[in-house]
Amino acid sequence: MEKLIKVEGLEIILSSNITPVNEAAGIVAEREQVYFQINTSWTDFIRGQGFTWVSDIFLTPMAAGGVAVQVLTLAPDDVQPTNVAVMVENNPDGQALGDGAKAALEGAGYTVGLYELFTEGTKDFSSIILKYKENNIDGIVTLISPADGIQFVRQMKEQDWSPKFIFGWKGFWPTEFKNALGEDAEGIVHDAFWTSTLDAPGAAELGDKFKADHDGNESVSVGLPYASVQILAMAIERAGVFEAEAVRDEVFGGTFEDTVYGTCVYDEDGTVLGEYYADLFIEDCLIVEIKAEELSEQGGSRVIANTRIEPGDKVIGVCTSDHLRTLQKLLLK
């Protein structure tokens, strides 16, 4: 970050998707008063820093952990776990999501039998798998990298262990995971915070381009960084100048329509309003869609994100975000 600012002379910068890296970069951006636009970092982490030159679009660990629970509520009885293990990377992202998942699972009445932190890049998961077998773990939720996820699943098979339910973030998204494991990836579930089927301008076209470049495989995440660039471009156009302060001021408290992610609304502190989920898929079958509403002080509401919600959809739960003005309704087709 120091080099980008002091050597390259940049004053408007887009982020990586690694929260600790983004937090460190945000501290530098704050000191140097350059605008740093983050995507894919926990919004409560970024909000807690009190940044005034840094924005963020993503969701909270608790909301992400809740997705696994929502999927479990839809699962048939024969795959319902009785003893779940939370297995996450031993870093700030992993620990935050692990805590959120544990709280969400226990809040929904599931037993969390083990909470395991592991080092990213682990080559041998045999001791962890043995522990799970010995403790009768029959469900796993995990934050894991693609390479580690592939290794973990292969070693599960080698040790002849197959839990009823496996749900993962991050490592199960990329097409490489499914392609490397083939049939062994069947039945493994993951979240998705974007899909080309969103009712958003350009989403289908972006999905088609991704598939064309990746042998027909789809992405569940590419829309968020793409939308981040769209938001930045709109902010620069509105500001009328390519200056950090002016562009930042357009984003903080701003509303950005017609991105591939739908309509994005930022709070005055630079974090996006609401907990945004994309459609969830199990074996290519759409099972959940999300609608987010922003409630006005007068008691009215307006839709700020909508993924093909139709009248008559059944409400299966309601979540509140850190912003009291926002409610998310989870709907089942």
Image (spheres, rainbow, N blue to C red):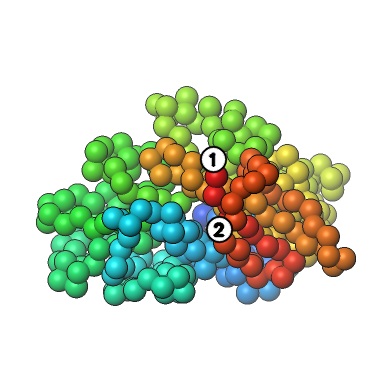
Of the two numbered discs 2 and 1 in the rendering, the one whose residue sits closer to the viewer: 2
Picture coordinates of residue 95, whole percent (x, y): 42, 71
Question: Could you say whether the residue bearing mark 2 is in a helix, strand or loop?
Answer: strand
Furthest residue in direction front, as rendered: 312
Q: Badge 1, how many Cα within 10 Å: few under 14, some, many 20+?
A: many
> Disc 2 marks which residue?
316
Q: Position of residue 276 (x, y in %)?
A: 61, 54
Q: Vertically, is 83 above or below 286?
A: below
What residue is shown at x 53% (from left), y 27% (from top)? 208
Which residue of the protein is positioned furthest toward the left in this rendering? 159
Answer whether residue 22 is visible to the viewer in this image.
no
Asked whether 160 or 93 is in front, the reply is 160
Relative to 56, residue 237 above or below: above
Residue bearing mark 1? 195
Residue 218, image x, y percentages: 45, 34
Q: Are marks 2 and 1 in contact (CB under 8 Å)?
A: no
Q: Secondary structure at mark 1?
A: loop
For image coordinates 73% across by 51% down, the residue present is: 304
> Image quarter for residue 32?
bottom right
Asked whether 212 or 182 is in front, the reply is 182
Residue name at image x 41 percent, y 44 percent: 282
Task: Specify whether 54 is left or right of 238.
Answer: left
Q: Give me the residue at 32% from left, 49% from top.
A: 188
* 160 versus 311 height, above or below: below
Q: Can you say which quadrant of the picture contains the N terminus?
A: bottom right
